[in-house]
Image: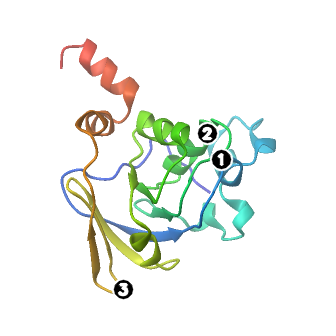
């Protein structure tokens, strides 16, 4: 279980390393964190239940810099803001998916969690637990076990500005302060 004071963030200036957590299609916000746990207000306690539906002991095994590689429609369902927040809280450096539910995607970007759209070939090239390297600028991911590298489409500049600032609110504060 996480006991953190600030979220780990992937570097924009170099290579990041982690482990792949490979998930399938249609992973909902309820799959990420069940609604019945949302009465828990402490992030450390709440994060213990992240992805528990999958029986992969995610909250205990995830490490800072790890990535999620998912299929289509990642983050579907409710607009539960806790879903991307808890993934970031546990140290996920980026989420790579063939598509995202629109609200989840914006919630992730707005809190500074990179959400990157990839092709099905990228999803299919990774197995659970393989080591990965990835960069955010330019966006790319590599399967360390096979040596296969995948350059990815760049994100819009204004999304990168939000991500570099650590989220929409920090960017707004920075902008208002004239920095």
Q: Give the left or right position of residue 127, taking residue 172 as reference.
A: right
- From the image, tell me which residue sits under label 3: 145
- Mark positioned earlier in the residue sequence (1 or 3): 1
Mark 2, Cα crowd under 10 Å, few <14 / some 14-19 / many 20+, is many
Task: State the SS at label 1.
Answer: helix
Q: Give the left or right position of residue 130, taking residue 161 as reference.
A: right
Vertical relation: 123 (above or below) 127: above
Residue situated furthest bottom in the rendering: 146
- The quarter of the image holding the N terminus is bottom right
Task: Estimate the x, y position of residue 22 in percent, counting from the top left.
Answer: 53, 70
Q: Give the left or right position of residue 70, taking residue 34 as reference.
A: left
The residues bearing labels 3 and 2 have C-alpha atoms spaced at a distance of 32 Å
- The quarter of the image holding the C terminus is top left
- Mark positioned earlier in the residue sequence (3 or 2): 2
User: Residue at image x 39%, y 71%?
Assistant: 122
Task: State the SS at label 2.
Answer: helix
User: Residue at image x 32%, y 39%?
Assistant: 163
Marking on residue 141: none
Mark 3, Cα crowd under 10 Å, few <14 / some 14-19 / many 20+, is few
- From the image, tell me which residue sits under label 2: 82
The answer to whether marks 1 and 3 mark residues whose Cβ atoms lie closer than 8 Å is no
User: Residue at image x 27%, y 21%?
Assistant: 174
Vertical relation: 87 (above or below) 140: above
Residue situated furthest right in the rendering: 36
- From the image, tell me which residue sits under label 1: 29
- Mark positioned earlier in the residue sequence (2 or 1): 1
Mark 1, Cα crowd under 10 Å, few <14 / some 14-19 / many 20+, is many
Task: Estimate the x, y position of residue 28 in percent, counting from the top left.
Answer: 66, 51
């Amino acid at each position: 279980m996480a006991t953190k004071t600030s979220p780990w963030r992937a570097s924009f200036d170099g290579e990041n390393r982690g482990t792949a957590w490979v998930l399938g299609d249609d992973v909902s916000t309820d799959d990420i964190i069940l609604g019945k746990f949302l009465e828990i207000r402490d992030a450390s306690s709440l994060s213990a239940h992240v992805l528990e539906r999958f029986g992969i002991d995610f909250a205990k095994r995830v490490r800072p810099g790890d990535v999620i590689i998912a299929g289509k429609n990642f983050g579907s369902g409710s607009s539960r803001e806790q879903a991307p927040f808890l993934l970031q809280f546990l140290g996920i450096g980026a989420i790579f998916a063939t598509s995202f539910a629109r609200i989840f995607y914006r919630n992730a970007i707005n809190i500074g969690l990179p959400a990157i759209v990839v092709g099905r070939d990228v999803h299919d090239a990774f197995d659970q637990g393989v080591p990965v390297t990835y960069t955010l600028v330019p966006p790319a991911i590599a399967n360390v076990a096979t040596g296969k590298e995948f350059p990815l489409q760049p994100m819009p500049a204004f999304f990168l500005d939000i991500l570099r600032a650590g989220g929409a609110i920090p960017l707004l504060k920075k902008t208002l302060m004239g920095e």
